[in-house]
Amino acid sequence: LDPWTEPYYAVYRSESGEPEGFVAYRTDDKWDDAKQPVNTATVRDLIAVTPAAERALWLYLCSLDWVTTVRSGYRAPDDPLPELLPDPRAARTVSHADMLWVRVLDVPRLLEGRAYPVADGLVLEVRDADGLAGGRFRLDASPEGASCVRTDASADLVLGVAELGTLAFGDRSVVRLARLGRVEEATSGAAARADLLFRTPLRPFSPDIF
């Protein structure tokens, strides 16, 4: 590992003076054979609560004198960074790592604890080889809230506990999972309905390793 060096910090504030984002980064000190700087700025953390703050912080990093490369650190899978650049092809993914894992143990609590953009109801048959969270559940959800209870009604979708974990975070298309054979559509059109119910505008991501 590289020795610890104290990072630089930059803070973005709104017009009213409220902090809305910050970046912590460090730089190296490298020069090429022509005595031109080829320094890299490496981001340790960049957290923003507004799109304006995020754009401003990346612009700041890409404007640093003598810096020719910016390493972004771990970013969300749908992070807007590449498309903030004049040429998105200038950004390269050099590593890929998961930062969020889930093992469903309590289906009703999981599904009742999240938000839903539309109103609908589905019966989910969850299969769990370990016998911890399996069963058939009736989910009734809307933007106002959700209820999830065990039921004997016929299933609309049949899926494994791992697939339920990805859907609970709005991470995957149910239609795609059905095409892959990882979700069984027991009621015609249920996968498309579940897509509308479960999908979120942003993919889940944890900026911290835990």
Image (spheres, helix red, strand yellow):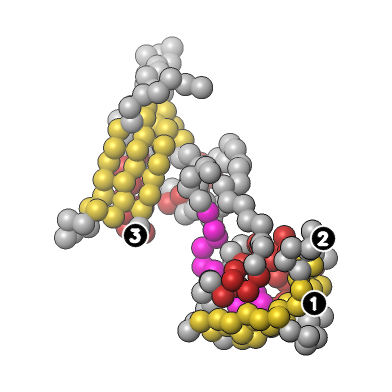
Q: What residue type is labelled 1?
A: Glu
Q: In this view, does 200 lie above or below 124?
A: above
To which residue does mark 1 refer? 185
Comes first in the chain, label 1 or label 3: 3
Q: Which residue is drawn at 66% across and 62% down?
A: 104
Q: What residue type is labelled 3?
A: Thr
User: Residue 128 appears at what percent x and percent y?
Assistant: 78, 63
Comes first in the chain, label 1 or label 2: 2
**Residues in magenta, as a range:** 193-205
Gap in Å between the C-alphas at discs 2 and 3? Answer: 42 Å
Local secondary structure at mark 3: loop
Q: In this view, does 59 lie above or below 160?
A: above
Q: Residues within 10 Å of mark 1 (few under 14, many from 20)?
A: many
Comes first in the chain, label 2 or label 3: 3
Q: In the drawing, does residue 174 fall left or right of residue 32?
A: right
Q: Which residue is drawn at 61% across and 62% down?
A: 171
Residue 199 painted magenta: yes
User: Residue 90 appears at what percent x and percent y?
Assistant: 51, 41
Mark identifier at residue 32:
none
The answer to whether the residue labelled 1 contacts the one labelled 3, judged by CB atoms less than 8 Å apart, is no
Q: Residues within 10 Å of mark 3 (few under 14, many from 20)?
A: few
Foreground residue among 49 and 33: 49
Q: In the drawing, does residue 22 fall left or right of residue 199?
A: left
User: Residue 18 appears at what percent x and percent y?
Assistant: 21, 57
Q: Residue at x 56, y 75 (%)?
A: 112
To which residue does mark 3 refer? 50
To which residue does mark 2 refer? 129
Is residue 16 something that shows in the picture?
A: yes
Q: Nearer the viewer, mark 2 or mark 3?
A: 2
